[in-house]
Structure formats: structure tokens, C-alpha cells
Image (spheres, helix red, strand yellow):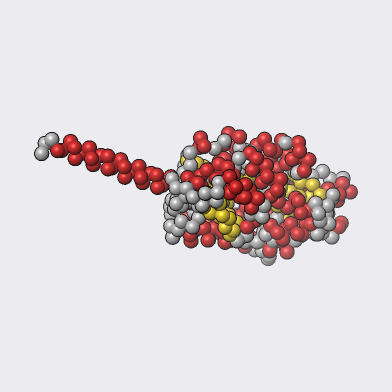
Amino acid sequence: MRRLIPVVLAMLLVAGCSAAGTQESERFGGTGPFTLVIGRPATAYLQPLLDRWNQAHPEERATLLELPEAADEQRAQMVANLQAKSDRYDVIGLDVIWTAEFADAGWILPLERSMFPLDRFLPPVVDTAIYRDKLWAVPYTSNAGLLYYRKDLLAKEGFKPPKTWDELRTQARTLHTRYDIGGYAGQFLAYEGLTVNFTEAVQSAGGQILNQDGTTVTMDVAKAKAGLDFLVDGFREGWIPQESLSFKEDEAQLAFEEGRLAFARNWPHAYGPATASAVAGKFGVTRLPGLDGPGTGSLGGYNLAVSAFSKRQKSATEFIRYFTGLENQRRVLADGSFPPVWAELYDDPALIKRFPYLPVLKQSILSARPRPTSANYNQVSLVIASAVSNALTPPFEEVGDDVVASMKGQLDEIIRAR
């Protein structure tokens, strides 16, 4: 019996190691056909890139699954799938602000940093994929807000592109009066876009909303009020048109293209269509203005993550390595007009000739900050958008100090509830 004990223990140890190895293999292994799921605005140019992968990997074919255009609807469908622990999704295209939430919920897998050339990416972009010191996704596209302006009208009035809010206010009011057009507009409908616009205003006044890891509300009331007042005053004084309270990205883009705005805050994707519009040859782009100088934008873009419930995790990870490689990143810009994450592409003369805004965009991304990082970001965004929307809506009875104080209190409750 004593002689049998070591044998039994050895057998149990081997069995235990085998089970652990199998479990680890199942968690990080699995090859075969898989699905890439991503929102519709980012998909129009993707099929040729998928075809190249599929030709080289016939046993690991990638299928594209498009989600709705609106970010809120994308997130809702993803959350429903992942809460059900479905293996329908393998590679997930996440809005950069969702990385923390999905990681915290256990819906995506941590990735090995050494597998990806992160040191060649723009540093702020890499930060959007890291949560609690782990890499949870790989940056695929980036984004930062830009100020589109009518350079022909500025030239007529002897103006230079504005760098401060005071300069923007003066120029927008002047052009609004003399040319009977809207002075300035951003995304002011009560949705995620309004959260972005307000966050940029707070940052451009020198403030922030949450600390870096999203565990504390760090909103300085005076700086947040300065950002809010900049927007409220624009509506009250008339150089921000009332119709922009219904603007998302597309509406702001169309208004600028039709010559109905002197200035518009939008993402880089609006540049290409404007070159074939009524303002072709008449506009330029610059960094967003701020309280005392160039402002601080909010980072946008997509990160690619591996679903924790995928049965093809090895294939999914290898695909992400392929899809975020340098040559595919070049195609992301050249074919899709989306800002890449590789820093060197912003200095490529051939690309700059085709996309003249690249130097400005690079500076905007390098100076931008991620939106408030929180596993409860959706609730954070809803509170901000609702409070700011009420303040921007006539008859402007909300007092800036009260709005910001109330917002800060609600955000405190959300963060403490974690």
C-alpha cells in the first residue's frame, strides 16, 4: 500500500497538469474560421483586407459581421452577446472607451504585449488599450477632433485660424453676422457625441473629469464651468445655431459641406467628403482651440480584442497581429480614410500629399486624452450628456455652477457604486 501511494500521487499530479494544460489550451488556443464584428462606419473598405487574409489562411477564414452605425447600438448588441457568453464573436472592434468596461466584465482576454509592435504606435493610442496595467486590445484606428474652418472667409476678414476660445468667438460672431451663416457647431445632440464635446471643453480649460484609472471624480468645478460656459454662451449669443442641438457627426458634416457653417468640430473622416462638396478648396483644418491656447481633444478610434468566449482564440489573436501590421495600417488610411495608429505613417510624404491634414491630426492625437476611463463609462456618459443638454437648451435657466456641481455629485455616486 505504501508503495502504491507515490504512484497514485504521481498519476494525480500528471492528471492535474494535463487538465490544467487542456484548460489553458482551450482558453488561449483554438483555430479555424472566425468572425470579426465591428460597427458599420468602419467596414466599407474592409473586405479586400479580409480577402487577403482568407487567401493566405483558407482554414482560418475571417467573416465580417457588421453592427449598426450608432455607437450606442453597437455596444448594446455586443453586451447582449457577451453577457450570454455566446461564441458568435471572435474578434471584436471596440470603441476605445469600451476597453475598460469589457475587460472589467471579463468579456475580453488580456493579450501579450510582446506580440505587437506597440513602441511604433502613437503613445496616447496605446494607452486606450491598457486597463489596470494589462493590454486588453490592440489599437487599430485612432481619431481626434479637428476644427474645420472656411479659409476663404477668414482670408476676406484678415483672420488667422483661431487658437483660443476668444478668437473663435470673435470670428464666429463676425462671420455669422456678415455672411448670414452659422458661426460654429459640434455634436450637441444628447448622446455620446455631446459627452465628447463637453469633455474636450473641460480638458481645453485645463481640467479633467475622472482620474486616469477612473476611480475618482477629479472634476474642478471652475474649469468645468468654463468649458460649459463657452458652449452655453455660443447658443445664448447666437453664433452657435439652435439647429445644432440635433447635430450628430453627419449633420455637422453636412452643414459645413453645404456652406452653412463657418467653423465645425468633427473627426478626420469629414475631410474627404468636404473636398467634393460646395466648400471644396475653401476650407482648412486646425487643432481645436482652448481657453488660453490650442485645446485638448478626445481620443477616438477602434481597438481589436479577443472575445473571452471565442473557440478560435489563437486564430483571432493571429488575425489581430496581421490586421494591425504596418501595410494594413497604410490601407486603413489610403482605402478607408481612417487615422492609423503607426506613428511613422503620419510623416510619409506620399500620404501627406493625399491627406494634407495628417500633420495637424498627429499633433491633435499626441495632445489628446482618452475620455473618462471607467468600467461604468456608459452611465458616466449618460449623466454628462443629459446635464449638458439641459444647460444648452433655451431658455438657459440652468446656472453653470449648479449644473457642474450636480453632475459631479451624480458621477461620484456612479464611481462609488463600484
Residue at 89%, 48% (x, y): give it: 156
Left or right of 67 in this view: 164:
right
Residue at 57%, 36% (x, y): give it: 118
Q: Position of residue 28 (x, y in %)?
A: 43, 45
Residue at 72%, 36% (x, y): give it: 348
Residue 17 seen: yes
For the residue pair 244 and 326, the one nearer the viewer reads as: 326
Figure quadrant of the N terminus: top left
Residue at 71%, 35% (x, y): give it: 347
Left or right of 102 in this view: 259:
right
Q: Position of residue 391 (x, y in %)?
A: 63, 60
Left or right of 117 in this view: 201:
right
Q: Residue furthest bottom?
A: 395
Q: Position of residue 100 (x, y in %)?
A: 50, 48
Residue 384 seen: no
The tally of labels here is 0
Left or right of 239 in this view: 144:
left
For the residue pair 120 and 202, the one nearer the viewer reads as: 120
Residue 190 in which image quadrant: bottom right
Compared to residue 270, the image places residue 352 above or below, namely above
Q: Position of residue 314 (x, y in %)?
A: 47, 45
Q: Residue furthest left?
A: 1
